[in-house]
Amino acid sequence: MTVTTIKHDVKDLSLASQGNKRIAWAGREMPVLRQIRERFAQEQPFKGIRISACCHVTTETANLALTLQAGGADALLIASNPLSTQDDVAASLVADYGISVFAIKGEDNATYHRHVEVALDHHPNIIIDDGSDVTTALVLHRSAQLGEIIGTTEETTTGIVRLRAMLADGRLPFPAIAVNDAETKHFFDNRYGTGQSTIDAVMRATNILLAGKVIVVAGYGWCGKGVALRARGLGANVIVTEVVPVRALEAVMDGFRVMPMAEAAKLGDLFITVTGNKHVIRQEHLELMKDGAMICNSGHFDVEIDLVALKNMSQDVRLVRPFVQEYILPHKSLIVLGEGRLVNLAAAEGHPASVMDMSFANQALAAEYLVKQKGKLAPGVIPVPADIDQEIARLKLQAMGIAIDRMTEEQVTYVNSWTEGT
């Protein structure tokens, strides 16, 4: 068994060898982050900087952690979801790379919140967050540390919603970069990453045939678009539910049926929530569902399905397959996947590395931007600078061997002029 003195709380360090191989495998598909890591190793932008990262502890996140470490950061990593940790990856980061990791797949809520406290005990200068739990805990309970913070970067739609609510309440005292809103993040990670990994998780957990099934996708943001697209591609009949008129209209124009959840509940074989909101599927919907209907969530927090109501309605709950729970009601049974948590990480491996390459490139470069702009940025939720977004896209295209056109001098002049017309 591997022995280490690095501070950690992981399942089993003897898993490190397996995790190391998988980290390297994911790294093959992350050329943008690799180029950034090589530059960081030379320039050391994080020398003397403490970074606490709260992320899904996966092979892709490991490559982000190694990039931060290469840049000189004193980095510590905790899980952003109790079911999203890959234990072999956590072990390898500790044993092979000397990074402090506090994450165990299946950790209970008390352990999760204790790890959040560990992240703050690290006295970070920068927080890389995924859901804003660490940032929220800092603002609510560690006000004495606020002066140590340069800023935070946020990976998720849910986390950005919390940050904006915090800002509206006058409780956000430092800059927070909305990494999720970068075009090279939400267009690709949310649409193609969530789309593929969610369907992958459903298939791994259940081994059901999706062709011919009625799949209800709750929410038609970028994640919902991706899930609906992939489900239709596998032959499913897709229904979309929405609360935003423009998104609902877009779903109709994209060829999907759109209706309220109260109507869709009667029709669906599989329900997938991707809204970032609470109790999208409630008791009144559960009562209408057919026997054997399956329900899962691919939003960040496990609040989209009212599991308390479902449990109260049930006579028994049993585990029928890994990550598949059957809730037995008086006249039917309903199936919940991944305990209602992020199904793509609870029952599968999360997004493909080639997609996370861009997302984590945004995280790395946003953290570097915060350090370079220390003291110059006002408190608030700020976008990823456009030049960073475009540079990530350029590097990705370059790595894929794809060339694009460049504007001629005449075209540059034209788009910056207002005098030429008909």
Image (cartoon, helix red, strand yellow):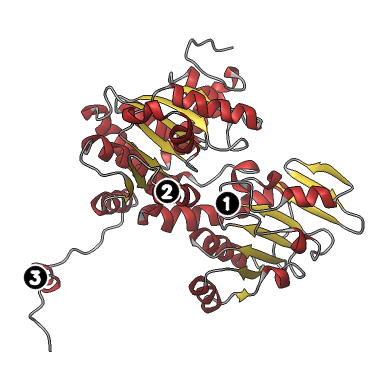
Instruction: Return the residue found at the far right.
Output: 330
* Residue 413: image tag: 3
- Dot 3, crowdedness within 10 Å: few (<14), some or many (≥20)? few
Name the amino acid type tagged 3: Thr
Q: Which residue is mark 2?
A: 169
Name the amino acid type tagged 1: Gly
Task: Residue 19: tell me if it is visible.
Answer: no
Q: Position of residue 154 (x, y in %)?
A: 41, 44
Please say if the residues under marks 1 and 2 sit with CB atoms less than 8 Å apart.
Answer: no
Report the residue at 50% width, 62% height from top.
221
* Residue 186: image tag: none
Which quadrant of the rendered structure holds the N terminus? top right
Name the amino acid type tagged 2: Asp
Q: Nearer the viewer, mark 1 or mark 2?
A: 2
Which quadrant of the rendered structure holds the C terminus? bottom left
Tell me: residue 12, above or below residue 365.
above
Q: Nearer the viewer, mark 2 or mark 3?
A: 2
Q: Nearer the viewer, mark 3 or mark 1?
A: 1
The CA distance from mark 1 to mark 2 is 24 Å
182 to the left or right of 56: left
The CA distance from mark 2 to mark 3 is 45 Å
Q: Which residue is mark 1?
A: 299
